[in-house]
Image (spheres, grey):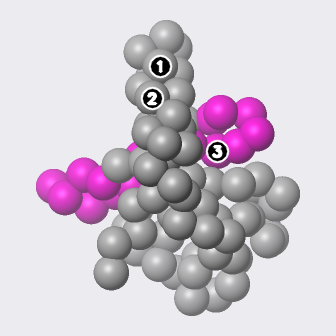
């Protein structure tokens, strides 16, 4: 099951209220590049932590983003990384 293009709502914890968009996956490091909205915060989260968050209801699935919206989020992530 691929999680890319998915948006999740953070239901509890330190980032409660944020939306997380999984924009890329690094197989070698086994982590996701994540865009936190609405702040456009760039995060790297391990695959294990994402799956644990889903299983424990910390992360609530919102939707699989349409391709154009996903590409915009991916571009925003890259822009933020390149302009830190």
Queried whether the magenta region covers residue 20, the answer comes back as: no
Q: Earlier in the sequence, mark 2 or mark 3?
A: 3
Image quadrant in which you'd find residue 59: bottom right
Q: Quadrant of the N terminus?
A: bottom left
Residue 51: numbered disc: none
Q: Is residue 17 left or right of residue 78?
A: right
Q: CA distance from mark 3 to mark 1?
A: 14 Å
Q: Is residue 82 left or right of residue 57?
A: left
Can residue 12 be seen by looking at this rendering? yes
Across and down, in percent, residue 45 comes to 46, 56
Mark 3 nearby-residue class (10 Å; few <14, some 14–19, many ≥20):
many
To which residue does mark 2 refer?
75
Give SS at disc 1: helix
Residue 79: numbered disc: 1
Across and down, in percent, residue 34 comes to 50, 48
- Residue range in magenta is 25-41
């Amino acid at each position: 099951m691929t999680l890319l293009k998915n948006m999740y709502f953070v239901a509890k914890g330190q980032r409660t209220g944020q939306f997380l968009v999984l924009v890329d996956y690094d197989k070698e490091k086994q982590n996701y590049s994540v865009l936190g909205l609405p702040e456009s915060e760039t995060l790297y989260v391990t695959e294990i932590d994402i799956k644990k968050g889903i299983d424990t209801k910390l992360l609530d699935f919102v939707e699989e983003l349409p391709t154009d919206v996903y590409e915009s989020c991916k571009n925003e992530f890259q822009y933020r990384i390149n302009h830190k």
